[in-house]
Image (cartoon, helix red, strand yellow):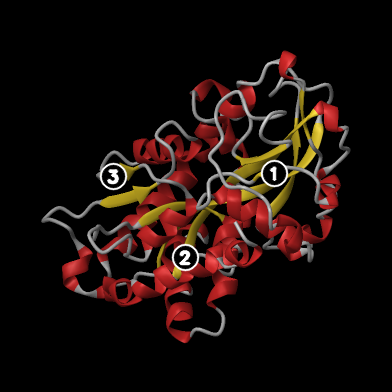
């Protein structure tokens, strides 16, 4: 993939979003409010067995009085396309909720600058709740003797940045672009990773994967593969903003017993997002109910004996309420109304 193609990857997505802008803007029309006589919430997630899908199921379980349709997807990019009402010429299904990586949403906002129509749509993507951190895993073969992600900058390393439209791909490339190193990503390849990383040391020297730890990929590694996780230390400046999509994180030996020591990294915040429905829209009340269920059930979810996903322990209601891009119908719940 050429550098121009890489740097325009999200721009291509933006143009696809733009093609569906008219449809997205029609979400306030009665025809778009309900897909049948029963009003329900459709949430787009990620892989069938991934953390997004599990979180969606646990959110639905908190609110048994509301019908949820949980639809797996290819990840954050597809989820954003679905949320604003467009996934392709032959697919017109409306989604009221989506799980996305915060930095993918940030990239879309940046790419939308200068295009008034697209920006008007993107500005109506609002956060219901920031959830947890998805750790950035950078796998490498020990024989390369690399000390950090910065060692990739020598340009001689064969890198797999994950599936082309995946959140992993956009995160890994965006990290380098933000600090002026996008040229180093020109020869990176884009393929979905497989359990056990059979290509490390053969086809690739480094593989990126963004997923909540411990991930199924990380747990599939065995000591005899002689792999390591590279620390991410070069990107501290990305944490300066109070609303940075990133947070500090640690990958530990408890999570991955094959590690020789704990590894510093960054995590991308996973967001539950919606479209900016007006307050008189019935989805406003439904999404307020979702927010209230998460708020009221959070302490139980954080309890280790609950059987809930351990990532619930990272959800911070104060952080949620302080966001500038919080959805108004979620904000009234988080602010005690």
Q: Position of residue 186 (x, y in %)?
A: 69, 58
Quadrant in which residue 59 is drawn = top left
The residue carrying mark 2 is 13
The residue carrying mark 1 is 159
Q: Quadrant of the C terminus?
A: bottom left
Query: Toward the viewer: 113 or 298?
Result: 113
Residue 97 in view in this figure: yes
Task: Specify whether 19 is left or right of 206.
Answer: left
Q: Position of residue 195 (x, y in %)?
A: 56, 26
- The structure residue drawn at horizontal position 83% and vertical position 21%, both measured from the top left corner, is 260
Q: Which mark is first along the chain, 1 or 2? A: 2
**Measured Cα–Cα span from mark 2 to mark 1:** 23 Å
**Measured Cα–Cα span from mark 1 to mark 3:** 39 Å
Q: Are marks 2 and 1 in contact (CB under 8 Å)?
A: no
Q: Quadrant of the N terminus?
A: bottom right
Which numbered tag is attached to residue 219? none
Q: Position of residue 163 (x, y in %)?
A: 53, 46
């Amino acid at each position: 993939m050429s550098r121009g193609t890489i740097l325009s990857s999200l721009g291509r997505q933006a143009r696809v979003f733009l093609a569906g802008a008219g449809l997205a803007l029609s979400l306030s029309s009665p025809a778009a409010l309900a897909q049948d006589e029963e009003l329900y919430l459709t949430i787009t997630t990620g892989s069938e067995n991934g953390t997004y899908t599990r979180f969606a199921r646990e959110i639905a379980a908190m609110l048994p009085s509301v019908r949820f349709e949980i639809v797996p997807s290819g990840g954050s990019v597809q989820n954003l396309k679905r949320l604003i009402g467009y996934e392709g010429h032959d697919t017109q299904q409306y989604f009221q909720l989506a799980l996305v990586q915060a930095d993918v949403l940030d990239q879309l906002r940046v790419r939308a600058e200068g295009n008034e129509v697209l920006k008007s749509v993107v500005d109506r993507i609002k956060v219901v709740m920031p959830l947890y951190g998805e750790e950035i895993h950078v796998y490498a073969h020990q024989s390369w003797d690399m000390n950090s992600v910065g060692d990739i900058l020598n340009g001689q390393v064969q890198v797999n940045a994950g599936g082309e439209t995946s959140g992993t791909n956009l995160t890994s490339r965006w990290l380098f672009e933000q600090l002026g190193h996008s040229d180093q990503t020109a020869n990176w390849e884009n393929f979905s990773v497989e359990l056990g990383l059979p290509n490390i040391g053969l086809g690739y020297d480094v593989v990126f994967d963004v997923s909540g730890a411990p991930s199924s990929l990380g747990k599939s590694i065995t000591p005899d593969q002689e792999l390591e996780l590279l620390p991410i230390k070069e990107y501290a400046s990305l944490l300066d903003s109070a609303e940075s999509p990133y947070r500090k994180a640690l990958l530990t030996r408890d999570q991955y017993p094959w590690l020789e020591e704990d590894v510093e990294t960054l995590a991308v915040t996973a967001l539950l997002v919606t479209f900016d429905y007006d307050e008189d829209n019935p989805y406003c009340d439904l999404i307020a109910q979702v927010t209230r269920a998460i708020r009221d059930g959070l302490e139980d979810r954080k309890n280790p004996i609950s059987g809930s996903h351990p990532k619930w322990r990272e959800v911070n209601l104060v952080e949620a309420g302080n966001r500038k891009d919080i959805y108004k119908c979620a904000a009234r719940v988080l602010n005690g109304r």
